[in-house]
Image (cartoon, rainbow, N blue to C red):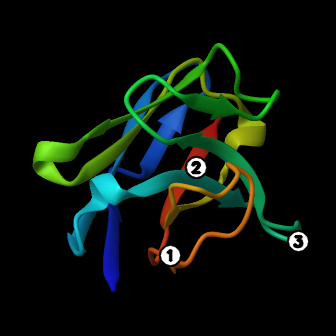
Amino acid sequence: QVRLVESGGGLVQAGGSLRLSCAASGRTSSNYRMGWFRQAPGKEREFVAAIKWGTLTYYADSVKGRFTISRDNGKNTAYLQMNSLKLEDTAVYYCAAGPLAGGPYSGYEYWGQGTQVTVSS
């Protein structure tokens, strides 16, 4: 069992930056791939980014070049650095953990409660 708790969301102006954190407890998070997803009002939840090991990362086309996913296994924490934020990045952001053997876009077993990110003009 892995428990995930997101933090770092908030209100930011377009063009600004935020860093989301996902603290994992329970089984060692280094044995899991970590992902970030988001869900905007009235829309389906969508993949944002994932990381398997320190350098194996995946990004949605919409955030490539602006967002960076990373992890600190010693702290059991994953991060999502979000730069050049746009209005369309407004959503609830969720952290997820799944087996290392799985693909980056689905098959996550554990989910956090979500953190709101609101980008204003």
Label located before the other in sequence (3 or 1): 3
- Residue farthest along the top direction in this orientation: 65
Residue 15, quarter of picture: top right
- Label 3 to label 1, Cα distance in Å? 20 Å
- Which residue appears at 74% of the width and 53% of the height? 105
User: What SS does tag 1 mark?
Assistant: strand
- Which residue appears at 65% of the width and 58% of the height? 102
Q: What amino acid type should be assigned to the residue bearing mark 2?
A: Thr
User: What SS does tag 2 mark?
Assistant: strand
Q: What amino acid type should be assigned to the residue bearing mark 1?
A: Trp
- Label 2 to label 3, Cα distance in Å? 15 Å
Residue 37, quarter of picture: bottom right
Identify the residue position indicated by label 1 in the image. Answer: 111
Residue 62 placed where, x, y %? 80, 29
User: What SS does tag 3 mark?
Assistant: loop
Label located before the other in sequence (2 or 3): 3
Residue 101 placed where, x, y %? 58, 56
Identify the residue position indicated by label 2 in the image. Answer: 118
Q: Looking at the rendering, in which quadrant would you find the C terminus?
A: top right
Instruction: Name the residue nearer the viewer: 108 or 118.
Output: 108
The answer to whether residue 26 is above or below residue 68 is: below
Q: Nearer the viewer, mark 2 or mark 3?
A: 3
Identify the residue position indicated by label 3 in the image. Answer: 42
Label located before the other in sequence (1 or 2): 1
